[in-house]
Image (tube, grey):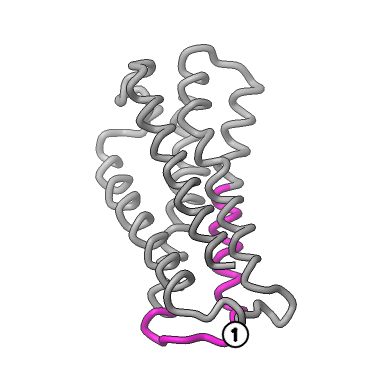
Amino acid sequence: MKILCIVINLIGGALVLGSYAYGLAQNNPSLSTLWGGVPASMRPFYTLGMILAALGYLSCSFYLLFLINASEARVYNIFSYNIFNFIYIIILTPSILFIFLASKMILAPSMLTWFTLRFILFLVALGAFLMIIALVGLTPRSSHWGYGLALIGSALFFLHTFILDAIIWPYFFKK
């Protein structure tokens, strides 16, 4: 179970980072265009949000991969540890598509691309929300400090993906 989670995170994470590297290396669009109209005064909040979200994702993943016993883990006494694998797939799969859809929206805008882009941003936020819900229902919980960091980290990740990515960024992108 943990091996699968590690594989999902390693492959999914590499594909997310690779998609960004590939998308940005194509020089279409430029980095400034990807801000989508977010005012320069708000960009430091995004930068801070990205850092906190990444640290939150990592703290949650560290807890799930190294501080709990996957064979004993239950979520709401219904789901096994594998629910976390499913949640990671919900988060990582649309994240891989983001840069390609954002670039396509800039270069050849269409309503279908716009709705697909919005949908994947909400999917990532949904995955982040499901992570919080699953952590709340997780038993047994080991390492109180690790659990606390995982919960706070997943909340920071959710706040960024939902508020900044799925709500605010598209609002400014349309302008």
Does residue 75 appear left or right of residue 92 in this picture? right
Q: Residue at x 34, y 52 (%)?
A: 49
Q: Is residue 18 left or right of residue 136?
A: left
Residue at screen point 40% across, 68% down: 62
Does 97 sit above or below residue 143?
Answer: above
Where residue 121 sits, quadrant-wise, is: top right
Query: Height in image: 25 above or below 71?
Result: above
Q: Quadrant of residue 55?
A: bottom left
Residue occupying the far top of the picture: 108
Toward which corner of the image does residue 53 lie, by quadrant? bottom left
First to last magenta residue range? 124-147
Location of mark 1 (residue):
139
Q: Is residue 175 left or right of residue 47?
A: right
Whole-percent x and y of residue 81?
Answer: 62, 72
95 or 157: nearer the eye? 95
Which of these two is toward me, 74 or 108?
Answer: 74
Q: What secondary structure predominates along the stretch shown in magenta? A: helix
Residue 137 magenta-drawn?
yes
Q: Residue 106, position in %: x, y? A: 46, 18
Q: What residue appears at the point 46 percent right and 30 percent down from the top-left corner?
A: 99
Q: Is residue 170 inside the magenta stretch?
A: no
- The answer to whether residue 25 is above or below residue 18 is above
Residue 140, position as x, y percentages in the image: 57, 87
- How many labels sit on residues? 1
Q: Is residue 37 visible?
A: no
Outermost residue on the right side: it is 78
